[in-house]
Amino acid sequence: MARTTREIYDAMLRDKAQRSELAVLNSSSTASIWRLLLWVVASAINVAEQLWEAWKMDVDVELAAQTPHRVDWYAAKAKYFVSGKVLMPGSDQYDLAGMSDSEIEQLRIVKYAAAIEGRDYSVLYVKVAGEDASGRRVPLTAAEAVQVAAYMNEVKDVGVRIELVNKPADLFRCSVKVLYDPILSPEVMRERVRSVIELYVENLEFNGEYSNMALIDAVQRVQGVKIAEIEQATVEEYGTGVSRGVNVRYIPVAGYMKPEEVIVNLEAYSSYERI
């Protein structure tokens, strides 16, 4: 971290005190010429150190961005794709001179990306998704997916086999039992709980891990909920027609999920034992 001007100035004073040939510079006035000169030099050194620090940070960021053989590098590269542009010869960069940031952003159709290795490490799966006008995750069109796949095969490291995963959202269905404060309307409670469940599922980090525990934690924070538990949770990879139960956790095949059916079974909570 760059030193402050005061730190540099004090260090120069300590060094000056050790030099007998500079003993004649003994004025204690802060306005003395020699002290003012030291302060000017200290200020210049401070600016130089700040510039060096900023340059080092830029170099570190650039090196991190160029590090190959890491899955997050491939995810970042997927989001770097610019529709309708070709890479510069012998490079993995585009010539975007003359384009504004907003123009470039509109052409970057891959809004979400994640890369994971296959079980036998022979394939690197790159999951991608775009966005619709309302900001919801959607798959790329078939034509866009072909372009992105070709781009990824061009920028990848030699020997890496890439398979692009571009699918509609996995379908999520669940049934939860909720014991609620009977002072509240059951209709209101049912809507509150359903809304929280849908928000949790839709706002999972791309390729993030769903868990029954996290879903129940979200439901427990709803005002009026006393006790909540999962009765059943199932997922379906889009287009397969096959549902599978979620015992503990699940990572969506498409990288994201859509709540298709959320059943909330309510029971008024009572602290009294039934006799």
Image (cartoon, helix red, strand yellow):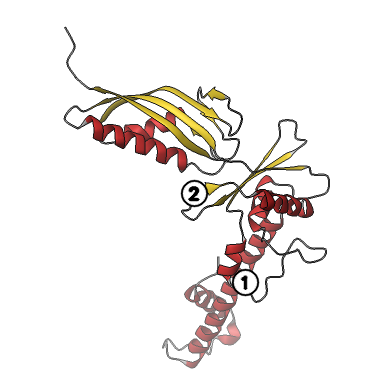
Q: In the displayed structure, would residue 165 be above or below residue 52?
A: above
Q: Quadrant of the N terminus?
A: bottom right
Q: Position of residue 60 (x, y in %)?
A: 65, 61
Tell me, yes or no, if residue 244 can be seen here: yes
Count of number-bearing discs: 2
Identify which residue, 142 or 16, lies in the foreground.
Answer: 142
Residue found at the very far top of the displayed protein: 275
Q: Quadrant of the C terminus?
A: top left
Which residue position is annotated with label 1?
A: 52
Q: In the displayed structure, would residue 102 be above or below residue 188?
A: below
Tell me, yes or no, if residue 224 can be seen here: no
Q: Position of residue 4 (x, y in %)?
A: 50, 72
Which residue position is annotated with label 2?
A: 136
Residue 269 located left or right of residue 80: left
Q: Residues within 10 Å of mark 1 (few under 14, many from 20)?
A: some
Are the residues at dot 1 and dot 2 in contact (C-beta closer than 8 Å)?
no
Identify which residue, 218 or 70, lies in the foreground.
Answer: 218
- Residue drawn at (67%, 60%), measured in percent from left and top? 83
Q: Amino acid at mark 2?
A: Arg
Q: Nearer the viewer, mark 1 or mark 2?
A: 2
Of labels 1 and 2, earlier in sequence is 1
Residue 58 located left or right of residue 262: right
Residue found at the very far bottom of the displayed protein: 33
Q: Amino acid at mark 1?
A: Trp
The quadrant holding residue 268 is top left
Which element carries disc 1, helix, strand or loop? helix
Which element carries disc 2, helix, strand or loop? loop
